[in-house]
Amino acid sequence: MPAVTASAPGKVILFGEHAVVYGQPAIAAPVTGVKVKVIVQADPLQPSGNIRIESPAINFHATRTELPEQHPLNTLFQLLEQALQISRLPAMKISINSTLPAGAGMGSSAAVSIAMIRAISQFVGLPLENEQVNKIAYEVEKAFHGTPSGIDNTVITYQMPIYYVRNQRPELIHLKDSITLVIANAGEAPSTAAMVAGVRQRWQQQPQYYEQIFHRIGRIVQSARKILEEGDWLALAPLMEENHQLLQSMGVSSPALDTLVKASLQSGAYGAKLTGGGGGGNIIALVPPEQAGQIAQRLLNEGAFHTWLTTLRPLKEDDQS
Ligand code: MEV
């Protein structure tokens, strides 16, 4: 069987993180400048049905039989076998390479799962539809992260900006105009699972306070969707500010994230907020395209560990088929 390669992009949440876990809508977009690439090839040295997984960047080398039963990759292999209706995947070597930082809130676990599901299903000659890929990736995300909303796997599967409500079909957002974002990393974050669990604990202690916040975030998301579709994107700036403040009051920002948000605004960004699970990880800043490089440099001077530029563009007709 010839080798097969599949890749998957990163993602950013534009609006609505955390509240989306509680049924509010959120908006996310793919970040195509960073990628997980998976190569699957035959591995004649492995005993029948064994799978070797190599991810040199994170020093992960294992075979399927060595993985603990509850390991998310075991979940992935088992769900793939069910979906493909085969009793056991054949022996193969899976190589994972990534320019997508792990633990930075850019969806690296979902991207790894999705690239693997696509590469393996093509390798065995039974490629899956997006909907099936997304369904399996969501189950694997649960094994990684506890109670995820499903937004990461959905935006990475479809690779388009989406309006997402938990357990509902994602709706594509048809951007009227391009928008340019600087993404800046404020350092390692606790796991998304830990951040989501922290919010859950505080919500249980103060349900009314948190539900009010979730509801306000949901309203912001609805306004943001309209703005993205109508093109007056400068109007996103105050919504980003308000969403960031609400995330602060939920206890998921950090001094480093707040510093980068402030520095973005001082150096010419229209709006900025943390993105993803928080506690560290990334911010996004909405910037005038011609100042993007300068703003990114300022953020590096203010302590950002890394920056990325990304432009979200309106879909072309043939992107939607
Ligand atoms: C993580 O990218 C976004 C969160 O809302 C968690 C989730 O939706 O699963 C924090």
Image (cartoon, grey):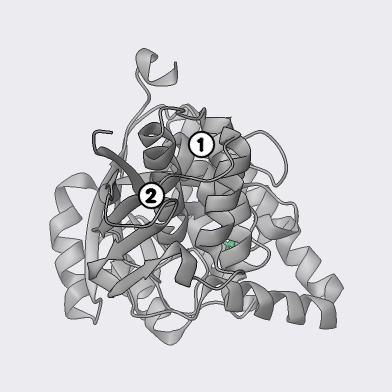
Q: Is residue 108 above or below residue 5?
A: below
Q: Is residue 54 above or below residue 235?
A: below
283 sits left or right of 240 in the view: left
Q: Position of residue 61 (x, y in %)?
A: 32, 71
**Left or right: residue 291 compared with residue 310:** left
Q: Which residue is denoted by mark 1 in the rendering?
A: 227
The image quarter in which residue 46 lies? bottom left
Decide which of tag 2 and tag 1 comes sooner along the chain: 2
Q: Can you give x and y, in whole percent of width and height, for residue 251 in the image?
A: 61, 81
Q: Is mark 2 within 8 Å of ligand 1?
A: no
- Asked whether residue 139 is in view, the answer is yes
Taking 29 as reference, is 47 above or below it? below
* Near-viewer residue (197 or 109): 109
Residue appearing at x 69%, y 59% in the figure: 21
**Residue at image location 74% in from the left, 75% down from the top:** 200
Amino acid type of disc 2?
Answer: Ala
Which residue is label 2 attached to?
91
Amino acid type, callout 1: Ile
Residue at image location 51% in from the left, 36% down from the top? 227
Q: Quarter-wise, where is residue 54 in the image? A: bottom left
Which quarter of the frame holds ligand 1? bottom right
Whether residue 27 can be seen here: no
